[in-house]
Image: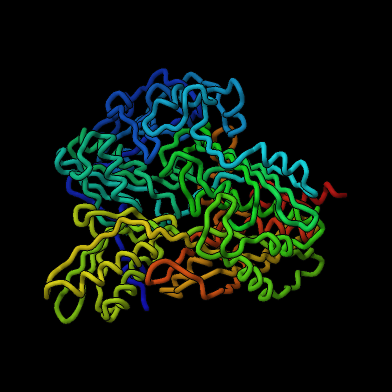
Amino acid sequence: MSRVDAALKASGRSRYVADFTLANMAYAAVARSEMAHARIVSIDTSAARGCPGVIAVFTAADVTATPYGRALVDTPLLARDKVRFVGERVAAVVAATRHEAEYAAAMIEVEYEPLDAVFTPSEALAPGAPAVHEQPWAYQGAAAKEGDPINLIHRGTHGSKEAVDAALASAAFVVDHHYTTQGVHQGYLEPQACIAEYISDEEVRIWLTTKAPYRVREMVGKCLDIDPKKIELEPITLGGDFGGKGSPQDAPLCTELSRKTGRPIKMTLRYSEDLTAANPRHPAEIDVRIGADEQGRIVAASMVANLNAGAYGAFTPSVPAPHGAVEIPSYRVPLFYSEANRVYTNTVPRGNMRAPGAPQGTFALESAMDELALVVGIEPAELRRRNLLVTGEADASHVHWIEHRGLETLEAALNAVVPIEPPEGWLYGRGISVYSRPTTSMASTSLRLTPVDDGCLRVETPLVETGTGSHTVLRQMLADQLGFAPQNIEIVGVSTNDLPRDAGAGASRVTAGFAAVVDVAAKAWMNRSRDEAIVVEVNEDSGVDVGSYTVQIAQVAVDPSTGQLKILELLNAVDVAAIINPLAFQMQIDGGATMGVGFATLENLDEADGQVWAANMGEYKLPSARDVPRYKTVKVPGAIGLGTANVKNIGESTTPPVAAAIANAVFDSTKCRIRDLPITAEKIYQALKGQQ
């Protein structure tokens, strides 16, 4: 079945934000801070105001002082009094063309008084550390309390540290190691872009690269004191997301500039801006301690993660650190302590990226599992076999899933792997990693179904197609339930004014959410009056805890003379229920694995002293076709999914385990343990030299 959007994208007729032009539209560009932390002494905009085509120039004194954010409301439209990271917006220029706006923005001169800065969570949490925000507890949505460490956004704990410490003290075998992960960008093809048209407080229209239009209109409305229902987010094609397009980004500023100038405003970031001032994944510092008895069964575990949130916390949907950083959902752990700290630093603000927190946490946990197997003296696969949960057991956080299929998935992976010969003179290694995650059971969306001529159906959805094929899956589900031929169903994206709700894409919830609303739509369709259009919506939790497992096996080769790493094969064994669209399903497996390969071995914003040095797509190394290894997929069918469609997640399942699988394979080949991502030839070479 062809994708709904295939013809438009293949022919180049899909229209993105950058393709739209409105009557009387002007263009915005911003002057950005060159300092990581400094007081603003003065801003000289005189040269910019005299540039050709300039309509207006704005500083913080000229725009609303109300900050914005998803859960934590702490981000100003333009820096006021001081800057907190390199790349922060200091002033905005509106001009007749984009080139003129950018030229004028470059003419703005800012005098700074440098302040001491902090760049890592460890620095930021140290006693006496410079304050990124003077009163972080005062922001709307803040979890921090006066008296907490000054740069702490949120500290979340689970379990008893004392009980875990006591159990580890008496365990037969214990490992205790520190792991670090780098900042990486989501790598979407389309950079952040926005068009805002303020007509009046009763009518505002926004075109935005966002996967969550209903949430964005709420945030823009609160920031600018406009009734959110008067703000219309227009349907738009999205050029990729991967978690990076859930926040309003520049929409509040563009809307304010439109209100100030009386003209539609367009702002499209250069990719250098997107890399240095958008919302990449949180770098992490993670300490893992695991103890086992004489038989290699886990008796207790502790995970403590410090996550670098950057200068602002506004770009994630919740204030706590991403829960995936300190979860152990796959294993039987009688005593478990976790602590997750999300911390302000003077670096680029961080946001969500595919499986938030899980790539960082899984790299640490699954590396530690291999390190535990070594001291116990058993094979890594056997250690996992002895400790994987079975149906009926609760995980370390006391959650009961309806079933656990980790053992079946592990055996399927082990049975399918076939050793590959490395190049002559290279070292061969094999590594394993396990990951499991829940399927989001909360469904919140709506649809309009309208019969049209010749037995066809028009279906309107507010959910943005992010490039995953979600609209195609919706068409297929409706065809199956309503008895239409898929080609007779037209799927149309509509604005926030046209339907009542949608939670946005993310958290691997789209197919499960569609399944729930299609169930409701099918019943309403059968009971409708002839030729009547119907609107249906869901906003409910199924109440069923469904999860899925992924087991990965990486085969690698290492050149001992240079440290060069080749990934010979990455095997993905996945625990599956019903598969609605096999091609899209496989695309998610392979795409997620490729993103994991980039995180594990290539991608790095290369941050130093608050500056992002990999600030262009030449320096920032996304995986290319030459970097992608051979993939092998093993599907383990028969799982219990959600609803009548019997579906479970896949979109975020194959990214988190990759880094540990590769790190474990590198150790298997070289006996060198890399605990700091990315795993590069230089790090392997230096580790090999250290053995000599």
Q: Position of residue 625 (x, y in %)?
A: 56, 65
From the viewer's perspective, is 244 left or right of 396? left
Who is closer to the viewer here, 572 or 369? 369
From the viewer's perspective, is 585 left or right of 30? right
Colour scheme in use: rainbow
* Residue 204 picture quarter: top left
Q: What residue appears at the point 34 percent right and 48 percent down from the top-left corner?
A: 193
Who is closer to the viewer here, 458 or 29? 458
Number of numbered discs present? Answer: 0
Q: Is residue 689 above or below residue 545?
A: above
Who is closer to the viewer here, 644 or 248? 644
* Residue 118 picture quarter: top right
Q: Is residue 301 above or below residue 385?
A: above
Tell me the quarter of the image containing the N terminus: bottom left
Q: Is residue 156 above or below residue 395?
A: above
Farthest right residue in view:
692
Q: Position of residue 244 (x, y in %)?
A: 43, 49
Q: Position of residue 156 (x, y in %)?
A: 53, 38
Q: Is residue 325 above or below residue 551?
A: above
Q: Position of residue 230 (x, y in %)?
A: 18, 44
Who is closer to the viewer here, 540 or 105? 540
Q: What residue appears at the point 41 percent right and 55 percent down from the top-left corner?
A: 506
The reply to whether residue 529 is visible in this rendering is: yes
The reply to whether residue 31 is visible in this rendering is: no
Q: What residue appears at the point 28 percent right and 79 percent down from the top-left corner?
A: 487
